Structure formats: structure tokens, C-alpha cells
Image: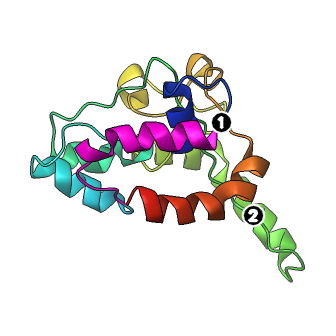
Amino acid sequence: MMMDFASKVAGSKDMDTEAAFKAMKEINPGVVKYYSKSADLVNMFAQGEVVAAPMQDTFLGSLTEALPSAKYVTPKEGAYALLNTVNIVKGSKHKELAEKFINWHLSKQVQEANAKARVDSPTNKEVKLTADEAKGLTYGPDVVENLKTLDLRKVNKEMSGWIDRWNREIE
């Protein structure tokens, strides 16, 4: 997502590695830390080390717990769709039980409880949240229809090269 967004900031219509790295190098002097754990980001906000950072909406609860004044802002350019999945391992001896678990996990009751507890945004369309409950979640057709997606085949193909280059040139 960062590569795609950096490409767009640099003026490219499509994900462009050269444009993305150029844009990242330009902002790199102002970066405090490239974090790998949401807890690191929460600590940096709480200690006043950072005032803005890219993050997933699912971490907003942890952040506002540590820093109640924190606000989540969706860029005017839009947000990316992130998918959490529940899968059955191929050849599972307990396929029926796994299917029951997935159905339970996707049930209105569980999805609503997860959303209200700020664990995850609901995927079950029967879940109805108030505006306060939906705040900071990916919820509602107006939000979902405007999510950006990535060409994951391209991302997976390029990822190891990006990581190598990132480690050499950025971090």
C-alpha cells in the first residue's frame, strides 16, 4: 500500500517502483521510525514522538486508549481494502467443524460483538451499527465502495525486491 500510495503522490497513475522510491526518499528525513508493531506506534504517539502516521483502522482503539485525543483520518485520496481471512487447511480431517467455525465467525452475533469491541470491522451485512459504534471502522456501503484495492499478483511478485531495496536505500 505504501508503494502504491507513494507512486500516486509522485504522480504515477499506476504502481511504479521508481516513482515510489523517489517519493519515499524525499520524505525519509522526516520519518521518526518505520514501525513493525502497532504497539510501537501507540508508544510513539503517547510519548509525543510522532503526530501523524499511516495505520490500519483496527488499531485506533489501542491508540485512543493511550491517547484519547487521537483522530483517525482517511486521506482524501481514499483508503485501501485490507482483508482478514479465515481458511480451512487443505486436507483437513475436520473440514465440517472448520466450516461451522467459519459460519460462527461470520455470524451477525460475532461480527457485531467484534465491531463493538473494536476488534475488526464487520463483514456481515446484517450488522447494524450506530454512527458512534461505526466510528473508525470500515463500515457501510459508502465507505466500502470507495476502498482502493491492489494488484496482489504484482505485489507478491515484486515484494522481495522491494524489501531488499527498501533495506538498502530507505531504512
As shown in the figure, which amino acid type bears the numbered disc 1?
Answer: Met
Percent x, y for residue 93? 86, 83
Q: Quadrant of residue 1?
A: top right
Task: Find the magenta span and give its range.
Answer: 15-35
Magenta: main secondary structure equals helix
For the point 56% across and 33% down, which residue is it? 7
**Which residue occupies the foreground of this view, 117 or 77?**
77
Question: Is 162 situated above or below 97?
Answer: above
As shown in the figure, which amino acid type bears the numbered disc 2?
Answer: Asn
Residue 119 is marked as: none
Question: Is 75 situated above or below 108?
Answer: above
Percent x, y for residue 128? 54, 27
The residue that mark 2 highlights is 87
Q: Quadrant of residue 50?
A: top left
Q: Quadrant of residue 37?
A: bottom left
Percent x, y for residue 90? 87, 74
For the point 69% across and 55% down, which residue is it? 158
The residue that mark 1 highlights is 15
Give the side of residue 151 with respect to residue 41, left or right. Answer: right
- Can I make out residue 128 in this image? no
Element assignment for label 2? loop
Q: Quadrant of the C terminus?
A: bottom left
Q: Is residue 26 magenta?
A: yes
Say few, some or many: other residues with alpha carbon within 10 Å of mark 2 (under 14 / 14 to 19 / 20 or more).
few
Say few, some or many: other residues with alpha carbon within 10 Å of mark 1 (under 14 / 14 to 19 / 20 or more).
many
For the point 75% across and 57% down, which residue is it? 157
